[in-house]
Amino acid sequence: MKIVGKIITESHGVAQRVLLGVSRFKIVGSFFIVGLFLIPDYAQAYIGPGAGFAFLGSGFIFVLTFLMAVATLLFWPLQWLWRKIRKRGISKKARARRVVIVGLDGLEPKLVDRFMAEDNLPNLKALSEQGCFSRLGTTLPALSPVAWSSFQTGVNPGAHNIFDFLTRDKRTCLPQLTSTKTVEKKPWFSLFGLSFPPIGAEIQITRKSQPFWKILGKHGIFSNVLRVPISYPPEKFFGNVLSAMCTPDLKGTQGSFTLVTTKSREDQSATGGQVQVVKAEADGSIAGVIEGPPLIKEEGYSKVCFKLVPVPSEGGAVLKISKEDIKLILNRFSNWVELEFDIGKRKRARGLVRFCLREIGPKTSLYISPVNIHPEHPALPIAHPIFFSRWLAKKLGLFGTLGLMEDTWGRNEHAIDDARFLEQTYLTHTEREGMFMEALNRTREGLCVCVFDASDRIQHMFWRYMEEDHPSPREQDVRFEKTIEEMYSEMDALVGRIQKKIRKDDVLIVMSDHGFTSFRRCVNINSWLKEAGYLVTKDGSSGSDYLQDVDWTKTKAFAIGLSGLYLNIKGREVRGIVDPSEVSQLKAEISQKLEELTDPQSGARAVRKVHDTAKAYRGLYASDAPDLILGYESGYRVSWDSITGTLEPEVFSDNLKAWSGDHHVDPELVPGVFFCNRKLKAENPRIVDLAPTALDLFGVSVPKYMEGQILV
């Protein structure tokens, strides 16, 4: 993946604290027109002042879904005829009528080499012999949102505007999410004090350029696109899309778990979630609440209450919630449970959660997953057309919709253990495969693409089992020593099941956006900048979160996110002090010092190369990139606290999180993989080559702005 680290999974994270400010939803209606020759579109989501997300009422969703489905059936013959008249569709010059792309996020080529040599990946090996297998050059930096954006658009980050999970707000120098933004919407007119449409704001995707499937759609070629990162909110085009990375939960965060426990804890805070410490009743039962969307008219969040009654004789408990009695078995995830939240003004929002009973007896603990947006009753736009998620749920059953389904922070914070994390990951993987196979069966021609995340998440959390001396603690379970190897075998088996559905003239591509390596040692870049005199804090301050204690009148440089280092440039940052004429010299000075930075524990260099983005990027948005991007050596990564601007006493520290593998190092160290059932005709393939290759396979002219080459 997408490393999704501390920022985008924090329950009261940057999205609310920095970008959004207040937490109040505005419910608005929207009008839609079904054009005679147009694919039906969903209504745009609106939000209230600073809320970040908005809800479409369930009744409105139902009516809209029904009308769109009817319109699609009624007008499909006319649309088909219109495309034929305009000669839109797959060209006779096309070299394929169906292209299938399977993304296995984070698959590491060195491990693929090893396991293929050991005959543990028979399907991938057969695919390489039939066609080709190669390393796939990734992006700078090697982060999932950056790489998958280049996959979609065929351009470098300077042209698609995604450089990290986080960027900095030039007005405040504070972190903000890079994938979406809120744009205030002005009413068309006001009458008698009422505005139409109601004053609010629109959520927009900040990735620029356009996905290649949008170009295919303009030529009448249909696409099914499932869970490709950086697709929220979904864009309209000729096809179906189910959004992925950065799709929020119903609370408006990037995933907030809840742990309800009778264990006493002095600190009830938890990164990526919350802990509720409760007292057990005489019969051992406990009560708790699940928070949902913010209330409309009041401060705070809507809530659903529950009661957990232990049943020791059956080794579990009964969960009483929403007039249901749900039997929970110790250390086993429940099925999806539907919840309904009253958010005020007679408006309700529906979501899904899974429960896992972690302890029962003298001490009781209950894990509750983040509240996912309900795919049948989406309160936020998660699919295009809007009824696509509803159709999938009706066809296949309920499924999770959160951008990061696997609760990495729930594991980091010990709300779940390794076994539960693994179970949760494969539950998601099974849902994803069902969707993909259904889409593949219905894609008789055109594009079908899906990204599977289990390969990334499992390597992030189980890499420590591959290294006996990794500083992160391991559970005493020998099963986990083979977890990563078994995951590669499962991905290979998935490819085998897909190959059975591939026709003779289909093109099948299996790829990853980057590779993987160990994450053993943390580097706090902001602490180093302070030691080196480039960052100055206010008198007496040791540096707090979000760079709040930085003295901007004396600070020349600061770091935000997983990769970026910014200069505090006069005329660009609101409190900039670095003269533009000094920028080149300051970049070179900082780069040299960082490339000479050594770990006092081992004497090893921590930074392999510092990249000057003015030289590395090109495009309309290159000026919005960090000034420098750090390419770490294998084993090193930016520290958890430095991501949000917190300073630590030491520059270097051990990584003690379960998140023990990573790919945020220099991109030359972590290329992805590229398999295809056609022969490779180009050398040194890169992820930007996928978009032009797909267009060329369908006989569609490649736009001149795309940077990639044709691979097969």
Image (cartoon, helix red, strand yellow):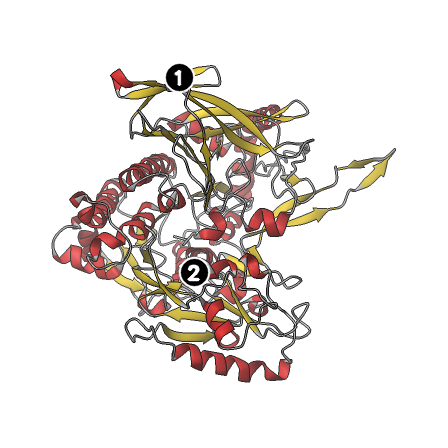
Across and down, in percent, residue 18 comes to: 61, 52
Compared to residue 663, the image places residue 103 above or below, namely above
Vertical order, 608 against 184 (above or below): below
Classify 10 Å Cα crowding around label 2: few (below 14), some (14-19), many (20 and above): many
Instruction: Pick the residue in front: 674 or 131.
Output: 674
Secondary element type, mark 1 = loop
In this figure, which residue is indicated by the disc labeled 1? Answer: 282
Q: Relative to 575, is 76 on the left or the right? A: left
In what quadrant of the picture does the C terminus appear? bottom left
The answer to whether 711 appears left or right of 59 in the picture is left
Q: Identify the mark nearer the N-term, 1 or 2.
A: 1
Residue 705 at least partly seen? no
Residue at image location 51% in from the left, 50% down from the top? 214
| Residue drawn at (68%, 31%) of the image | 298
Disc tally is 2
Whole-percent x and y of residue 61? 58, 28
Check disc 2 and report the residue beneath it. Answer: 692
Q: Residues within 10 Å of mark 1 (few under 14, many from 20)?
A: few
Residue at 40% over, 30% down: 262
The quarter of the displayed image where residue 534 is located: bottom right
